[in-house]
Image (spheres, rainbow, N blue to C red):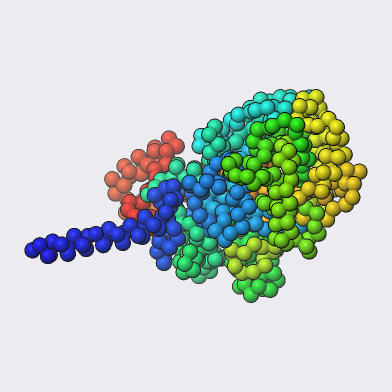
C-alpha cells in the first residue's frame, strides 16, 4: 500500500512538472496569461480572427475583437514586459543599438543609404520609439473618411492606458519659449490635439520614466477569447478558391522558435478574417510572399501568383528629419520629444536633450542617445562603404571626446507628409529578412523647400533670447551647421561647407525619425474598410495604409485605428448576423414552419435590436476558441 501511494505521488509530481514545463516555461515572463511562446502552439488550430503582428495596431485590434470572438495574434518577436532596455526612459536607444538576432529591433538600410529600424517585439514601434503622443488633425480624420465620434472614443480608450503629461524642465521650457518668441503661435499648452502653434504633447512614459506600449492595451482583452504566440513569424497567408468567386483567405502558416511549422485556420463562415498588422515593411512583404503583388516580381522569386496587384509595395514614404546639435555651457536634463512647434509651412520643430540617455547613467560610456551611431544615425560615407566596421569606428571615436561634447541637445525639424514616394521589393522569400525599400528622400521639390524652411526656423530658435542660456555665444550658426554636417548622422556622402546651402545641408544630414509608412494604400491595395481589393476575408490595418503620416507622430493614430476598426467590425458583424437570423426566420415563416414560440422570440429580438443592443455570441469553452 505504501509503495502504491508513493508511486501515485510520483506520477502526480511528474504530471505537474510536465505541465509547468509546457506552460510556465512556455509562457516565460510575458505579462499576460494568454501570451505563450510559439513552441506551445498546437500544430493545427481554428479561430474567428487571425491577426498577423502584435504591434501598434494589432494589440488594440485584438483586445477589442476578443470581447466577442476567438482571436489569435502571431507576433514574430518577444515580449516587452520587464525588459529594461524597453521599459525605462533612461535606457532609450539600448534596444535600437542591439544588433543580435533576438533584439527587439531589426536594423535595415534603405536603398537611399539611411539606416533605419523596424520593430521585432510585441507592441511594435511603441516598444522602441521616443514616446511622443499626439493625435491626428481634424482635416486628416475627415479625409480618411473616419467617423469623428468613434475616432475620439477610440483615442480616449487608448489614452486611459498609455498617455501621460510629461514634466517640463529647463531645457524643454527654453525650447517652448523660443518657439513662441520666433512667432510659432498661439501657445496651446498641454494638449494631445494637433493644432497650429506651440504645444506640449503627451508621452507614453509615465512620471517614473516607465514606458507604456500598445501591448499594455491587452489589459482590455477578454482572456478567454484571445491567444498570443511570441516568436511566431508567419510564412504566408493561405487562400482557397474552391466554391469561391475569387481567392479567399483561409488561414496562415507560421513557424515556432524551434523551426516547426504550424497551421492556423479560420473558422467556417462568411465573417472570419485574416488581418495583417505587420507594419509598413512587414505588411506589403507578407502580401507578396503570399502571392499578392506585381506578377513579374513574384514570378522572379518563384512565388505562385494569387492576384496580380502591381500597387502592393508602392508609395513608400519616410518623413525626413534633420537636426542641429547645440552644445550647452550648462547641464541640461535628459529629455526626449516633449514640445513641438507646428508651423504653417509644413515643418514641425522639436527638441531632445541630455547626455547618456542611451546608456546607463552609472556607466562610463557616453552617447548621443537619439542621435547616436550606436542606433544607426550615421554619416560621412557613401552607400557602397556602409559597413558595420565604419559604424564601429565612429562609436570608438566617441569614447575619446571630452564630456563637454555630450552636454547639450538637438533641435530638429521633421516635414509633414512627405510628398516624395518610393517602393518596396522582396530580397528573399524569408519573412524574417528585410525587404529592399527606397524612400526617395527629397525627390519632390516641395519636401526640400519645407526642410529649408524648417532649418531656418531652427536657426531662429538657437539665436533667440529665450534659448541664450543653453548655447555658446561665440559659436555662430554656420559653425553649428558644419559641426552637424560632419557628425555621425547618416551614411550619405558629405559636401564641404554645407552651411552655405541649406538645401545641401538637408540632403547631407537627413535621418529617419522612424515614421515610415505606405505600401498598402487605401484606394489602391485596400478599400475604405481596409479590406484587400480583389480577395476576400483579408484586411490590412496599420501604417502601411497611410498616404501621409498623421500629426507630428503617428503612434497615437495607429493605436486608435486598431481600436476603431475593432469596434466597427464588431458592430458590422453583429448587424450582419442579426439580419441573417431574421432572414432565416422569415423563410421558416413563409413555409409554415414558424411556431408560436418562434414568433414570440422573434418579436423580442426585434425590440432588443431596435434599442441598439446586439447580443454577444461568446464561445462557451476553450475548445470553441482554439486555446487547446
Q: Residue 456: x and y, percent?
A: 84, 36
Give the percent coordinates (x, y) of residue 56. Answer: 57, 47
Residue at left 66%, top 63%? 435
Q: Quadrant of the N terminus?
A: bottom left
Image vertical order of residue 375 relative to residue 296, above or below: above
> Would residue 459 be visible to someone looking at this image?
yes
* In this picture, residue 475 sits left or right of residue 404: right
Q: Quadrant of residue 150?
A: top right
- Image coordinates of residue 233 in percent, x first then y, are 53, 62
Work out whether 627 lies above or below 430.
above
**Depth order, front residue of 522/205:** 205
Residue 108: which quarter of the image? bottom right
Q: Nearer the viewer, residue 250 or 613?
A: 250
Image quarter of the C terminus? bottom left
Q: Is residue 516 left or right of residue 580?
A: right
Q: Residue at x 36, y 44 (%)?
A: 602
Residue occupying the point 41% across, 66% down: 44
Instruction: Work out whether residue 387 or residue 570 is closer to the camera in this orientation and state it.
Output: 387
Residue 319 appears in view? no
> Compared with residue 458, is residue 617 higher up or lower down, i.e. above or below?
below
Amino acid at each position: 500500500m505504501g509503495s502504491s501511494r508513493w508511486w501515485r505521488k510520483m506520477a502526480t509530481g511528474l504530471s505537474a512538472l510536465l505541465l509547468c514545463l509546457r506552460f510556465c516555461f512556455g509562457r516565460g515572463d510575458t505579462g499576460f496569461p494568454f501570451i505563450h511562446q510559439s513552441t506551445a502552439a498546437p500544430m493545427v488550430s481554428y479561430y474567428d480572427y487571425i491577426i498577423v503582428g502584435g504591434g501598434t495596431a494589432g494589440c488594440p485590434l485584438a483586445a477589442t475583437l476578443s470581447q466577442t470572438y476567438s482571436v489569435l495574434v502571431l507576433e514574430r518577436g518577444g515580449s516587452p514586459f520587464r525588459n529594461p532596455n524597453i521599459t525605462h526612459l533612461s535606457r532609450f536607444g539600448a534596444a535600437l543599438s542591439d544588433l543580435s538576432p533576438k533584439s527587439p529591433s531589426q536594423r535595415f538600410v534603405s536603398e537611399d543609404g539611411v539606416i533605419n529600424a523596424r520593430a521585432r517585439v510585441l507592441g511594435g514601434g511603441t516598444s522602441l520609439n521616443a514616446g511622443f503622443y499626439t493625435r491626428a488633425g481634424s482635416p486628416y480624420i475627415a479625409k480618411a473618411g473616419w467617423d469623428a465620434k468613434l475616432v475620439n472614443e477610440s483615442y480616449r480608450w487608448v489614452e486611459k492606458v498609455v498617455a501621460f503629461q510629461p514634466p517640463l524642465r529647463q531645457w524643454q521650457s527654453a525650447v517652448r519659449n523660443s518657439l513662441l518668441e520666433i512667432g510659432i503661435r498661439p501657445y496651446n499648452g498641454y494638449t494631445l490635439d494637433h493644432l497650429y502653434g506651440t504645444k506640449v504633447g503627451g508621452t507614453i512614459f509615465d512620471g517614473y520614466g516607465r514606458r507604456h506600449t500598445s501591448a499594455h492595451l491587452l489589459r482590455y482583452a477578454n482572456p478567454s477569447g484571445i491567444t498570443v504566440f511570441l516568436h511566431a513569424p508567419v510564412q504566408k497567408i493561405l487562400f482557397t478558391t474552391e466554391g469561391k468567386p475569387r481567392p479567399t483567405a483561409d488561414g496562415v502558416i507560421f513557424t515556432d522558435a524551434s523551426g516547426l511549422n504550424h497551421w492556423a485556420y479560420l473558422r467556417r463562415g462568411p465573417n472570419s478574417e485574416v488581418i495583417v498588422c505587420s507594419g509598413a515593411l512587414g505588411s506589403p512583404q507578407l502580401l507578396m510572399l503570399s502571392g499578392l503583388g506585381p506578377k513579374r516580381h513574384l514570378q522572379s522569386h518563384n512565388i505562385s501568383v494569387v492576384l496580380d496587384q502591381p500597387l502592393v509595395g508602392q508609395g513608400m514614404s519616410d518623413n525626413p528629419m534633420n537636426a542641429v546639435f547645440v552644445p550647452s555651457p550648462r547641464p541640461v536634463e535628459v529629455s526626449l520629444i516633449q514640445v513641438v512647434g507646428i508651423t504653417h509651412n509644413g515643418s514641425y520643430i522639436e527638441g531632445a536633450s541630455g547626455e547618456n540617455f542611451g546608456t546607463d547613467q552609472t556607466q562610463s560610456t557616453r552617447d548621443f542617445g537619439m542621435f547616436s551611431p550606436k542606433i544607426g544615425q550615421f554619416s560621412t560615407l557613401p552607400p557602397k562603404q556602409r559597413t558595420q566596421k565604419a559604424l564601429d569606428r565612429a562609436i570608438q571615436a566617441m569614447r575619446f571626446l571630452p564630456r563637454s561634447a555630450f552636454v547639450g541637445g538637438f533641435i530638429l525639424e521633421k516635414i509633414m507628409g512627405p510628398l516624395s514616394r518610393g517602393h518596396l521589393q522582396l530580397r528573399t522569400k524569408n519573412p524574417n529578412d528585410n525587404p529592399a525599400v527606397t524612400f526617395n528622400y527629397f525627390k519632390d521639390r516641395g519636401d526640400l523647400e519645407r526642410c529649408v524652411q524648417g532649418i531656418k526656423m531652427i536657426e531662429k530658435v538657437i539665436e533667440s533670447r529665450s534659448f541664450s542660456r543653453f548655447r555658446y555665444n561665440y559659436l555662430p550658426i554656420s559653425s553649428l551647421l558644419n559641426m552637424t554636417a560632419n557628425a555621425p548622422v547618416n551614411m550619405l556622402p558629405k559636401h564641404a561647407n554645407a552651411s552655405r546651402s541649406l538645401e545641401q545641408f538637408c540632403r547631407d544630414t537627413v535621418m529617419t525619425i522612424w515614421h515610415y509608412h505606405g505600401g498598402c494604400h487605401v484606394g489602391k491595395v485596400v478599400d475604405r474598410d481596409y479590406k484587400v481589393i480583389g480577395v476576400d476575408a483579408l484586411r490590412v490595418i496599420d501604417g502601411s495604409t497611410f498616404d501621409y503620416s498623421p500629426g507630428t507622430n503617428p503612434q497615437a493614430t495607429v493605436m486608435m485605428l486598431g481600436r476603431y476598426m475593432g469596434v466597427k467590425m464588431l458592430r458590422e458583424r453583429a448587424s450582419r448576423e442579426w439580419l441573417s437570423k431574421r432572414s432565416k426566420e422569415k423563410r421558416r415563416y413563409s413555409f409554415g414552419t414558424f411556431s408560436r414560440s418562434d414568433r414570440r422570440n422573434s418579436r423580442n429580438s426585434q425590440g432588443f435590436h431596435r434599442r441598439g443592443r446586439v447580443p454577444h455570441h461568446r464561445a462557451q469553452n476553450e475548445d470553441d476558441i482554439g486555446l487547446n
